[in-house]
Image (cartoon, rainbow, N blue to C red):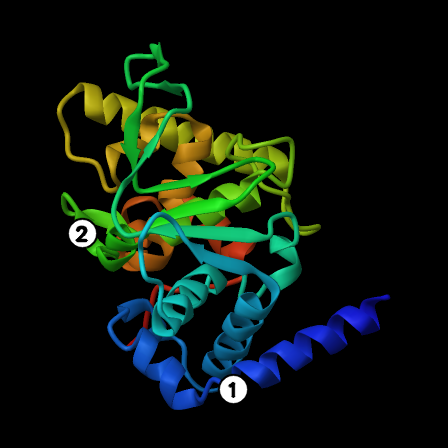
Amino acid sequence: MNWISNWLENRRLKKMAVTVEQWEAAISDWHVAHRYLGAEREALRKLSLRFIARKTITAGGDFQLTDPMCLKLATMACVPILKLGLDWYDHFQTVIVYQDDYVSDQPYRSDDGVVHSGTRGLSGEAWLRGPVVLSWSSICDSGPQSRQGHASNVVIHELAHKLDMLRDGANGAPPMHPDMRPGEWHDTFSSAWGRLQVDEEQGRSLPIDDYALTNPAEFFAVCSESFFEAPENMKNTMPKVYRLLCQFYRQKPAPAETTR
């Protein structure tokens, strides 16, 4: 039945009739998009349009979600899976976008380990068997130094959680490719996480946002934000983690070093 799904998807794409110029205008203010040129840029554009055709992107509350907003969101969502394929997102269907941080009444664990049952404001959320929820104001705040000097991208963060959930839930260990070793991933990420915990305890500055120290799932998600938004910083400060993320995402976002 795949041919029927493909046929329906192609019909939706044709009906959308999004021009190259419209897509370019929607992503023009996101610096990460400028990294992709030529055939890669065209592949990213086509993948983004298929994301929109395949998913349901809807506004939460009274927010007015426009077509350019959907194009920018979809492009951010597709950067991590540009070399992996859209099938990696088959396990969820819906993206809900609120104008600002939204209130969640789900139980949550604070940094001190205490579980709270009250409400709290969130900029993004990825449900294990449900939608991705995002704040548009947080999407607009994406950048290499937008979160107290650290990289931030709520779309990449929450979609990294979705990738992580493909293997035994959100635990910081997404599915490994055949040429990767799960043991190396575990040891490298555990060592990096432990080193940053010591740095924080001793008052040293961290190369990524300290929210990464919440748990292994958040560590992977925050590292993914930095990998795409501030790759040179990650390559210089966390080279082993950067190398494994290159293997997982099949991309090398930091400029290659030149030799003289």
**Rendering coords of residue 205 (x, y %):** 15, 34
**Rendering coords of residue 180 (x, y %):** 63, 47
Left or right: 58, with 128 as reference point: left
Please say if 198 is above or below 34: above
Other-residue count near label 1 (Cα within 10 Å), few / some / many at <14 / 14–19 / ≥20: few
**Residue to which mark 2 is pinned:** 146
Residue at the spot 60% in from the left edge and 33% down from the top edge = 183
Q: Amino acid at mark 2?
A: Ser
Residue at the spot 49% in from the left edge and 75% down from the top edge = 44
> Depth check: 124 or 97 in front?
97
Residue at the spot 56% in from the left edge and 36% down from the top edge = 173
Left or right: 185, with 99 as reference point: right
**Residue to which mark 1 is pinned:** 17
Left or right: 238, with 44 as reference point: left
Dot 2: element: strand
Q: Amino acid at mark 1?
A: Ala
**Front tag of 1 and 2:** 1
Q: Earlier in the sequence, mark 1 or mark 2?
A: 1
Residue at the spot 21% in from the left edge and 25% down from the top edge = 200
Q: Are marks 1 and 2 in contact (CB under 8 Å)?
A: no
Q: How many marks?
A: 2
Residue 78 visible in rendering: yes
**Rendering coords of residue 24 (x, y %):** 35, 83
Q: Residue at the far right: name it.
A: 1
Residue 256 visible in rendering: no
Disc sitting over residue 217 in the figure = none
